[in-house]
Amino acid sequence: MDLIRLRHLQLSRRKYLTISGISSMSFLLGGCGTPIFEDLVGTLSEPLNQKIEKLIFSPQKAVPEFSISEIQPEELIVNTFRYTPIIDIEKYRLIIDGEVDHPLSLSMAEIQNLPLTSMIIRHICVEGWAAIVQWGGIRLREIIALAQPKSNVRYAYFKSADGYYESWDIASALHPQTLLAYQKNGEPLPVDNGAPLRLASPIKLGYKQSKWVTQITLTSHLTPFQGYWEDQGYEWFAGI
């Protein structure tokens, strides 16, 4: 994608954020003009824990962060799903598609030209360990806004280079502290931790935070395949 088009989409992103009222629950939880049958299908396909947890989830409330002195550089355990993929950074593209007006194919250079956000948060694994980490990258909602999703989008699917797959509710994806990270503790993100891009957020358990992300698909409905671990019985919403 050339830089002129990227700048145009950045302007469109600002307009989208203003018009959509990104904190409004009407957008985050579904469009007003969706046919009744589609609303019913969407409701029935939602995981039960989402219906409960979204009632208490605050889409724009920030989670308290930590100081640099509290970072725990040795505590972040590397969990590998199948293998560590080899990714050619020069050929890498992040695909954003689905129910959007402007599908995207972004290089790492284009992503790193977008505003950098850094945060120091606690990463919590379902296995019982935790680590305070500084992540740096682009807010996921900035990328989503560039793609200009349709008003009925309710979910984001993530595909990874190692075959891992995940899905999030759109409210969590648009949370201001949900990042696509390419830095860890002020340095380039190591491959073992998910380079070139991984999800990082203080509002989800670790298994929701996909590494080596290559594709984000925005959609109005969940498919039967909701996430690698979720399809084996793990909680879908996995909020903290």
Image (cartoon, rainbow, N blue to C red):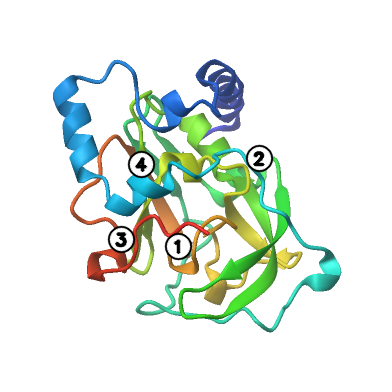
Q: Earlier in the sequence, mark 2 or mark 4?
A: 2
Q: Please, what secondary structure does the residue beneath circle 3 have?
A: loop
Tell me which amino acid carries mark 4: Tyr
Who's the residue at 52% across and 39% down the image?
174
Residue, x 20% and y 44% (percent of image)?
Answer: 45
Residue density around tag 1, few if under 14, some if 14–19, many if 20 or more, within 10 Å: many
Q: Tell me if label 2 and label 1 are in contact, CB under 8 Å.
A: no
Mark toward the start of the polypeptide (3 vs 2): 2
Element at label 4: strand
- Which mark lies nearer to you, 3 or 2? 3
Packing grade of label 4 (10 A; few <14, some 14-19, many >=20) is many
Spatial CA span between label 3 and label 2:
28 Å
In this view, the mark in front (2 or 4): 4
Spatial CA distance of label 4 from label 1 is 15 Å
Q: Which residue is mark 3?
A: 227
Say the numbered circle drawn on residue 155.
4
Q: Identify the residue position indicated by label 1 in the image.
A: 210
Tell me the quarter of the picture where residue 222 sits. top left
CA–CA distance in space, label 1 to label 3: 10 Å
Residue 132, position in %: x, y?
A: 69, 70
* Marks 2 and 4, how far apart at CA: 23 Å
Q: Secondary structure at mark 1?
A: loop
- Looking at marks 4 and 1 on the same chain, the residue that comes earlier in the sequence is marked by 4
Residue at 46% x, 66% y is: 87
Which amino acid does the dot numbered 1 rest on? Answer: Ser
Given residues 182 and 45, the one toward you in this image is 45
The foreground one among 194 and 134 is 134
Residue 205, image x, y percentages: 49, 64
Label of residue 114 in the image: 2
Above or below 81: residue 111: above
